[in-house]
Amino acid sequence: MKTILFDASLCNGCYGCQMACKDEHCGNDWSPIAAEQPTTGQFWCKVEQTTRGKIPEVKVQYAPVMCGHCENAACMEAATDGAVYRREDGLVIIDPVKAKGQKAIADACPAGVVYYNEALDLPQKCTGCAHLLDDGWTVPRCVDVCATGALKVVDEEDVPEKAVPMPAAAELHPHVYYVNVPKRWVYGVLVDRTINEVVIGATVKLVDAEGVEVASVVTDEFGEFRFKELEEKAYTVTASIEGYEDVALAADTTAEDVVLGDIFLSAVA
Amino acid sequence: MKTSDKTIYKNMSLCSFGNGANLTAVDSKDGKIVRMRPVHYDEHYTKEDLNYWTINAKGHTFEPGMKTLNSPFTFIYKTRTYSPNRIPFPLKRVDWDPNGERNPQNRGKSKFERISWDEATDIIASEIVRIDETYGRNSIFCQGDGHGETGSIHGPHGTMANLLDMTGGLTMQARQPDSWEGWYWGAKHAWGNEPLGQNTHQHNLFKDISENSDAVLFWGCDPETTPWGWSGQQASRLCFWFTEIGVKQIHIAPDVNYANAVHSDMWIPVLPNTDAALQLAIAYVWMTEGTFDKDYVETHTEGFDWFEYYVLGNEDGVPKTPEWAEEKCHVPAYRIKALARYWAKHNVSIGHCNGGSYIRSCYSHEPARLEVYLLAMQAVGKPGRNQVKFIEWALIGMDSFNPLPPGNFLPEVRACYHGSVLGELPASFIPKTLVPQCITVEPGEKVEWYGHTTSRHHRTDQFKKFQFPQDGDHGIKMIWSDSPCWSTCWNGGNEFQDALLNPNLEFFLVEHPWMENDTLFADLILPISTTLELDDFGVDTYSGQFNSIIWEQKACDRQHESLSDYEAVLEVAKKLEKYGGVYEDCASHLSGDMTVEEWQEVGYQGSGLPEEEQDLELIKKQGYQMLPTREGWEQEPAGMIEFYEDPENNPMETPTGKIEFYSTGLANFFPDDMERQPVAKWIEESESHQERISCERAKDYPFLLVSNHPRWRIHANFDDCPWTREIETCKVVGIDGYAYEPVWIHPTDAAKLGIENGDIVEVFNERGTVLGGAYITERVIPGAVLQDHGAETDPIVTGVGGIDRGGANNLIAPSKTSSKNAAGEVTGGFLVGVRKCDIHALMEQYPEAFEAEHYTIETGTNVYDYLQEA
């Protein structure tokens, strides 16, 4: 079926997808596909932001979390009376009449993207803009407004191999995939503070807990080194530079990216 | 299912003076707006029709795309039209009686009552006539410029000035170059580049950078924020493109702004408004290591030896070394050297997006001029070495502002435009930065300044002296504003609030759609329609794809009793006609006795579109008409290449025709100005400003405030939008259930201050206090705090020393201008203290300020809290 492919390397974090989704569904009743969404509080397309790193290497990672219209939809299993059904095009729809009062439908979703509308007594979620597709549109609002191409609709067989199912519902075979989300990284700068110079062209190595060299880079014109696409592991950064004491610094990426910052080298006595 | 029954087209930029961007489709159903969405050009046009352009570099291709690249503000605009804070009907302050007590001291305090349009326009006409007869027309002061919607026929700004001008005159507010201060007051004196002082030779610069640059320095520049209101998201796509082709993006700023956060290859954190020190140290490295282009300096510039003398320390005994700079700007000396050497070895361009503490703080002319010096030392104009803008790609209707492939011509709205034209000023005018001083000027005294101060005026205009009031005039008796955001967007808003209480000011009239900011201080308020309720005529020339002409139609019915600015002024004109004399037929003169549809036709016919390409039936039906890219654009000279190759025949607009390290104009006219000397320098502190961390004041106010153009607003617009307000970086909800403007604080500073994430905090100095919500983050350098400007004012105590709950930090910005003889605003990079706020103590002390019943976290303040209960 049609699948949403999110390319993190093209997302600028504008929240346009999240807000256009609200433009479409808040205050607009698209029954029998969906009842009105409340003005605030529900995020059928929810942009999550994570700040990574520390001064002076800080990045913000954005990712939209949305309904996966999952192959093994937990909401469908939780529903009674056929209140959640799958259309021929694969979209999973909560029937706004039959689902009334069925809070279990909202509770079942591991991604937390089925909301419960207390005022209407109704579970609600993304419809894939089924009402628009039925009216001739080819993509949902979130994809239509994306200016950078970070959100695309593709056929599931065209999802690139390196893409991963949306982590929030990975077990249920969601039809939302992520690609190019940066894995862990380590950053630092080699500096001789006694003469106020960065150290350029020095070889810096990344070694894992078993002492195996994982990567090796040379510091650039700013004395900087960056190790990217790392696993979540306890690494060590080492450098042997003539005239200076050897460097060996812990760089444990288990919980977060590591910014070693400006590393002041000590001259050999 | 029917998902809409009507689609109309709009330009959704907020450029305000007729120029437009963000072509948008608006769908409605049963008279209600259902959605706003991008326009797909291929509905009506082929790539061939558009003469579709591409930029090819390093084996990659950049394409403009076949759909509009709207900013997210486009998709939420209906919440502004349907905002609960819309002013529903004309309002009069309850204790303002035009025939009795006017109670000026109660402006901003007392409530409002409903009156009819008929009553309101009667009062306005009679006040205009009375003030004219009693004091003369120069006592009516019009604020009719910028920071609002873009319209043409409905002239969102300055229509009233046209009415007053044709019936006897007025005093006009001169909108100074508020986003370009340093360029205007400084860089123009170094390299001309009229009229703004930013590089106006931008043709083909994105092609040039793609082909030739190794790096772009984003110096205080956020292509993911500032362009949203003007040109949409092409700037963002260009940053991704630079990543794709390996153009290094280096961000120099106190904060990880939104572009830095996703695009940067490197960030150099610098304390706010200390860039001049960093720049001087870079020059020092180049001078001492001999790594600048001496031949170019010899042939293309004037006065380098003056600059060299200063930088090397011969003038003041202080060499401007990287170690010297480190202490000022907190960029380590080793990083300054590395940057200087990288720059000397590679092709480097500098990118800008306006705003921020780099270009609108104290002495902003200095970093601006120093940037020009550095560019000149590395042969600016050489391929890959230029200054480029990521915004305003057709500013002032200048084709040469466009660094992307341009359209075959620049369409314009002038033929049907009813607003004020920036730069066209009557004899009596006031620079926007000096309004509080001019409202409060004592009889017999004058406020003096240099220049007309608008972004349309030539460098030499800065040498002319002006004053207010004119001889024999009586100061400001009436203000008529259609841009009521002075307090939240200009310099020293608390002084402005105080000035509005001046007894000399008899009548303060505001036209506005929403109850916010200066509107709270009005005596009479006219409710104005938003653009989605109006038929109009527009263009899209800023988007960086293709130009278009737009036959704008209304998407919904008028909300409440609102009229457009143009219609409101016409209603006043009709009442004035009854007085005869100069007022005879003034409404007819203003409207030309034409309907809006007739004006739309005039606009279309006068847009510049060749007659043979005009097709009224088509544009009425289709809603917009696309214009193709100019033939042969690839061959047009890139940036300042002509000056680079032949300076004699392609001179800059300076007295010498060269880039002036020593500004000969400033030397002639202001030889004793220590704040803006002929050569740009580091000014520690001076008569006008004490805003450095080295100053005595810094003991009480130790932080420098970063106050950027806001991410989730366009200046003061959009603070009532529920869908932005629930975004993490938009508002921080305090323990009292109020949504505060975030204050970014570095974790080390927060720990010292005992502040935790989500705490309500006070940002303060002797000019007052604004509240905010603590957002503790690595995205700001220690020693600086960040709070975007433009939050909606919500006064607890008004005026100097006051307290603002909304977090409108311009209220506590210095009221002194950039420097003594430069009338720019200082709205960032100034000293503040930060402390945890005891909100309950404030509630006890000022209970009446916490009584709002209609306030919601979703949409903020509400007009009904300002109305007297019937």
Image: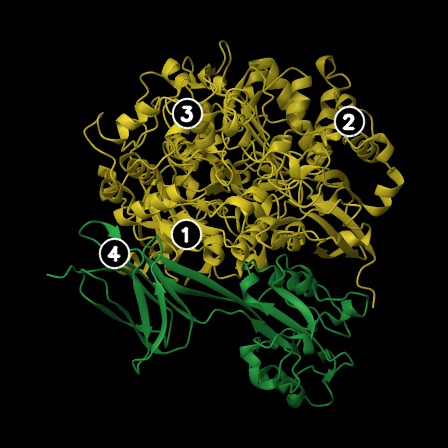
Image quadrant in which the N terminus of chain B is located: bottom right
Q: Which residue is mark 4?
A: A191
Same-chain status of marks 3 and 1: yes
> How far is the residue under mark 2 from the one under mark 1?
49 Å
Could you say which disc has been placed on residue B847 in the image? 1
Q: Is label 2 on the same chain as label 1? A: yes
Q: Nearer the viewer, mark 2 or mark 1?
A: 2
For marks 3 and 2 on the same chain, the one whose residue lies earlier in the sequence: 2
Q: Residue at x 59, y 65 (%)?
A: A40
Residue carrying label 3:
B822
Tell me which numbered mark, 3 or 1, is placed earlier along the sequence. 3
Q: Colour of chain A?
A: green
Is the Cβ of the residue at disc 3 closer than 8 Å to that at disc 1?
Answer: no
Residue wearing tag 2: B591
Please state which of residues A136 and B243 is positioned toward the viewer in this rendering: B243
Task: Determine whether label 1 and label 4 are within 8 Å by CB.
Answer: no
Q: Colour of chain B?
A: yellow
In this rendering, the label closer to the viewer, 3 or 2: 3
The residue drawn where x is 40% and y is 54% is B266
Q: Nearer the viewer, residue B21 or B453?
A: B21
